[in-house]
Amino acid sequence: MTATPVWSVDPRTGRPREQVAAEATPQEVDGAVRAAHEARAALADAPARAAFLRAAAALLDEAAAHVIEAADAETALGPGRLTGELARTTGQLRGFADAVDEGAYLDVRIDRADPALSPPRPELRRYKVPLGVVAVYAASNFPLAFSVPGGDTASALAAGCPVVVKAHPDHPATSELCASLLRRAAVATGLPADVVTVVHGFDAGLELIRHPLVAAAGFTGSVRGGRALFDAAAARPVPIPFHGELGSLNPVVVTPAAAAERAEEIGAGLAGAVTLGVGQFCVKPGLVLVPEGPDGDRLADALTKALGETEPGVLLDHRMRENFVSGVAARAALPGVAAPVTPGSGGEHTVGAGYLTVAAGSLLEGGAYELLLEECFGPVTVVVRYGDQGEAAAVLGRLPGNLSATLQLSAAETAGAPGPAAELIGQVTGLAGRIVVNGWPTGVAVAPAQHHGGPYPAATSHSTSVGGTAIERWLRPVAFQSVPDALLPAELREANPLGLPRRVTGG
């Protein structure tokens, strides 16, 4: 059988650039997973893991010019955007190395025996152990930060789990380059190169999720693709955790008081958030509730002006471009939907930014209008004009789970007095994993308190794919009851030889 070639394609022209690899056969996927499984023992050395993560960050920084050039050629995201993304990526690697050194992620807890309690309590010592081989499914829109060297990979390796990455077809050359750097870093720090492996191909992705030695998976992508993999993970003879980030509308609510106070500022800010990265951010605001009346009209005018001045942009691939153009056309064809700035085709290889608008009452009818409650990937948003807070609340009540929800409030409303703003905070907290006030959701800070996830379909679990707690996805707790000290793992021994932070109950 002839291997199916994997080509790098220039999204600016639609032309193939070079053949990068071949789609992995079932035998090659099996070999990659088994090699990763054999590397688990080496990753158990925490100092070596931390050194590896830092070495990987250093090699990526040294090769920055080549990495950015490769990524731009395959994604058209531009050197400026990609320079920032590379810094975020290497920062994540170093941050997880610090987490390994600190050891708090192991969540060591010790309950000393207390026979005086009723019932008596035995000696209990608990910590977390790595799950095993992790399958990572790379995202199209972040060729670095959510791809081969990205957060899923970094957090899994920090947890002690080797990784097999299913590369995204939109940036195979970038994936191979980054994988080679990570594998070099592994060898340089005394670890097997196979702690990180890359496979290509749709069928390889299915083989990977079904492999009996794969212990967990991380995914960032579409609802359709993520749900198929999630179902496959659950249908295995031994189901495994599947941490998928799927689709999100990221609703924005503009209160009447906020519109009266700064309509033009909000309209311009919304345009910037919708067009950032040509609208290809998973936290792009896709549904915006704006009050009816003169203040809402001023906001819409500012949005119209800003979007009308936005140059057409290139999407990540031509399939996404076709989906965007057809998706916008289907939404614009609904009765009562207007397009003050028509989004869609901006040329043979580009798309133009714009927005659609509809009355809240129409959206509440359901039926065909349900389409407006689905994410449309690209530079478009839907402005929903509402009459009062009850109508806005009713629209919010129709929404599925989201990664983020944003409130644009007035100065008086942010003062914290009880009222509609507090009620809105309560309502959107049930809808999203991150609540933003008087900002925009685009731009997800990599920080210990960050949460990038949300109710389904934003995510398939309650974990985060960004921030320090992302490591928790690849660990499971184990408790040791009445086990002699000499037989305990070093992490749990009484003398605490590893100097780990621990929570101790009892004398």
Image (spheres, rainbow, N blue to C red):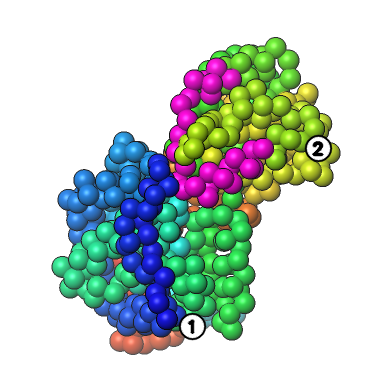
Mark 2: few/some/many CA within 10 Å (<14, 14-19, 20+) = some
Q: Which numbered circle lies on residue 364? A: 2
Q: Is residue 247 above or below residue 204?
A: above
The residue furthest top is 294
Q: Residues under labels 1 and 2: Cα distance? A: 46 Å
Q: Residue at x 58, y 29 (%)?
A: 354
Q: Amino acid at mark 1?
A: Pro
Q: Give 39 or 127, whichever is nearer the viewer.
A: 39
Q: Amino acid at mark 2?
A: Leu
Q: Is residue 307 magenta?
A: yes
- Where residue 27 appears, as percent x and y from the top left, is 41, 83
Q: How many marks?
A: 2
Give residue 128's quadrant in the image.
bottom left
Q: Is residue 122 above or below residue 472?
A: below
The span shown in magenta is: 304-329
Q: Residue at x 71, y 22 (%)?
A: 291
- Where residue 492 appears, as percent x and y from the top left, is 35, 75
The quadrant the N terminus occupies is: bottom left
Q: Residue at x 60, y 56 (%)?
A: 223
Q: Residue at x 66, y 45 (%)?
A: 374
